[in-house]
Image (cartoon, rainbow, N blue to C red):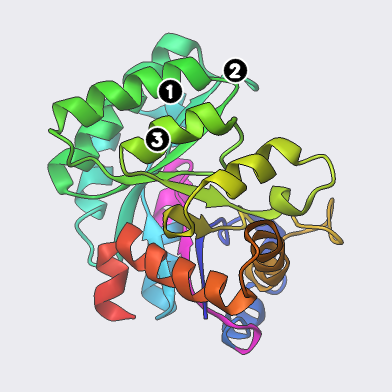
Amino acid sequence: MIFDTHTHYDDDAFDEDRDSLLNGLREQGVAAVANMGASMDGVRKSVELAKRYPFVYAAVGIHPDHVGELDEEQLKKIGEMSEYEKVVAIGEIGLDYYWDVSDHDTQKYWFGRQLTLAVEKGLPVVIHSREAAADTLAIMKEYYKKSQGTLTGVIHCFSYGPELAREYLNMGFFLGIGGVATFKNGRKLKEVIEMTPLASIVLETDCPYLAPEPYRGKRNSSDKLSYVVSAIAKIKDVPEQEVEDVTWENAKRLYPRAARTI
């Protein structure tokens, strides 16, 4: 079975068929999904999805594009929601210097505050980093050290090279691998997959975004992860079933709260 560790089923791209799509996932080999918070509204909707569907889990956190809406009161509310048993992580949080919706100092401040929250709550983090490699790594190292090595999580949609991958792997973080692994121009990611132990990889879609070939450019969903499984198996020269089995166990190690109820 497959665990999709990063989804956005609260997105309006799923408004017309969300229920039928989610209820049909198990027949497609997907037994669990984690829905990410991005905005405060998205956080609330993620928790609602987790309460409605037994196989859906939630992460609560504010994406760097939306940190302009954060204040200490909102952060307190996120902390309160994080105590719900089906909230499995603080995420997605991080830095995004591509869109630059919020200034860098604001992004870094709320990134740090949310990392602190994760450590306080004993929850893993889901890290978004786009064109912000150096700052993301520096902050992660700082908070990993502050946590005395207890900070855990996943680098979502890993898009940097092998050297950065080793830095995160050395801290015990998972790498989230999705549709880009199937792209013809995804050579850098394929190099990362090749050097990364399978025990450190988790599957993700980031749906409705980043659909794999042959669906690139179309709406993504968890049932398309079989293409990612196939790509990883080919790169690592292992059976597809091994990729499914190992990443399933990895996802449960990443999200211990989910492991208790699966």
Magenta segment boundaries in residue numbering: 27-44
Label 2: which residue?
100
Residue 155 image offset from top left, x and y in percent: 46, 41
**In the shown orientation, is residue 148 left or right of residue 158?**
left
Label 3: which residue?
168
The residue under the point 83% across, 58% down is 213
Badge 2 vs badge 1, beta-carbon distance below 8 Å: no
Alpha carbons under labels 2 and 1: distance apart: 14 Å
**168 or 2, which is in the foreground?**
168
> Dot 2 surroundings within 10 Å: few (below 14), some, or many (20 or more)?
few
> Dot 3 surroundings within 10 Å: few (below 14), some, or many (20 or more)?
some
**In the shown orientation, is residue 98 left or right of residue 108?**
right
**142 or 99, which is in the foreground?**
142
The residue under the point 58% across, 52% down is 177
Q: Nearer the viewer, mark 3 or mark 2?
A: 3
Secondary structure beneath disc 2? loop
> Dot 1 surroundings within 10 Å: few (below 14), some, or many (20 or more)?
many
* Mark 3: amino acid: Tyr
Secondary structure beneath disc 1? helix
Does residue 241 appear anywhere in the picture?
yes
Q: Split into 4 quadrants, where in the image is the C terminus?
A: bottom left
Q: Which badge, 3 or 1, is on the more N-terminal residue?
A: 1
